[in-house]
Image (cartoon, helix red, strand yellow):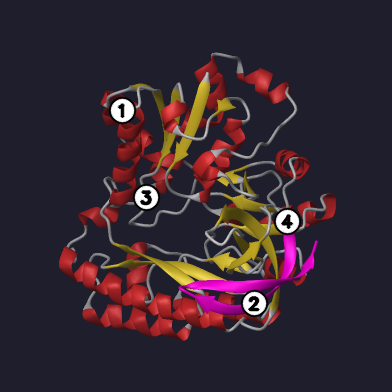
Amino acid sequence: MKVFFDTIGCRLNQAEIERYAAQFTLVPDAGSADMVIVNTCSVTAAAASDSRGKIRSASKNGAQVVVTGCWSTMEPEIASAMDGVSLVVPNEKKDSLPSIVLGIEPEIFDEEPLKRIILPGIHARTRAFIKIQDGCDNHCTFCVTHLVRGKSRSVGKERVLRDVLAAINAGGREIVLTGVNLGAWGLDLDPAVELADLIEFLLCETDIPRIRLSSLESWNLSDRFLRLWENPRMCPHFHLPLQSGSDSVLKRMARRTTLAEFRRLVETAISIVPDFAITTDVIAGFPGETDTEFAETLEFIRSIPFAGGHVFPYSPRPGTPAARMKDQVPKAIQKERAKVLRDIFEQKTEQFETSFIGTDKDVLWESSQLSKDGLYETHGLSGNYLTVTTKFSTPVRNRIDTVRITGREEGKLTGKVLKIS
């Protein structure tokens, strides 16, 4: 059976399909598949809509459609009723998806050597996404994650090591540790440990050149954890969802941080690695957000050396306290505030990126495409998440080169290779 995996949303969803994919015969597009497995998302109304769109597109191609992930877990009846959907696998059974789909006992997969393959088509990556944690014990008032993902659960360090070694054996040069709430890794284990313990273990037991973390909350991060970035194998990039630059809004959101604590974390990271890239998420127009609170957000964001950020107009999610709050901000005001925030982040991204012109960075090349001049335009990532473009006479992928950043054109950094690894 030829299978195409499609996914919407976070890097955790990407990590999950990479793990499941090794059990199937994969094809690069839905049109050539007998079965399409869609890993859905519900973090925003737009993500839920995108999930339904992916399912509809898959069914039009005549493939059998299997649906899993957060949106289908939240609204399983609607997912089951969609044309072409033959099976809905809820999140609590998602890790058994290959055995459920193929009708094989889960124990068989546990006994097999773990494999990792490069996914074909639109989800191809040189970086391997490694799931180390799932679920969330936080109760942010706008978020459905704890409803559809359940309580925080950590993947044991030996299982994580197996996944990392498999990625290395497949030629991986960088791993990205992913989870719903990465900073909570280890707190549910017996005895309880912390994320720093896992990272130290991986640094000791593997020779993977680069370790990167996906999005993590700004709490549960100790000084010991931050000091790990003194090791050059740790990619100096944190994506820390702020959500608001107003303490009063953060309180209504039930976020477990304050602006002062967030600022201290950023300052500490940059003191360890001056090139540290800090990116974030911000919600525009959270219920009750006043003009004064929005002004506080703008002032705080301008004061932090962010390398970039994602902006989301507030989206009420079913079953969350925020959806029932009074003083919902009109959509027009949400849209206006979101534009202001995006403009600020665009300026910050340009400022951050141009500051590296003339410097040298190690770049992991991810993709090459033949251009009109007969050369291969190639894109890659530095450790601190700069996207760099250069040209080669042949396709280059999954190689780390030392590159001199030469300029910024049309929103992209350009570079010249100084040293080939």
Identity of the amino acid at label 3?
Val
Q: Between marks 4 and 1, how big is the CA–CA gap? A: 38 Å
Return the residue nearer the eye: 126 or 264. Answer: 126
Disc 2: which residue? 405
Disc 4: which residue? 399
Q: Between marks 2 and 4, how big is the CA–CA gap? A: 17 Å
Identity of the amino acid at label 4?
Arg
From the image, state whether disc 3 or disc 1 is nearer to you: 1
Pointer 3 local density, CA inside 10 Å: few below 14, some 14–19, many at least 20: some
Q: Between marks 2 and 3, how big is the CA–CA gap? A: 36 Å
Disc 3: which residue? 43
> Is 13 part of what is drawn in magenta?
no
The kind of secondary structure element at disc 3 is loop
**Image location of residue 291, percent across then percent down:** 22, 80
For marks 4 and 3 on the same chain, the one whose residue lies earlier in the sequence: 3
Classify 156 as above or below 22. Answer: below
**Image location of residue 179, percent across then percent down:** 56, 49
At x 62% / y 61%, what residue is drawn? 380
Position of 57 compared to 14: left or right? left
Pointer 1 local density, CA inside 10 Å: few below 14, some 14–19, many at least 20: few
The kind of secondary structure element at disc 1 is helix
Identity of the amino acid at label 1?
Lys
**Image location of residue 188, percent across then percent down:** 61, 46
Which quadrant is the C terminus positioned in? Answer: bottom right
The boundaries of the magenta stretch are 399-421
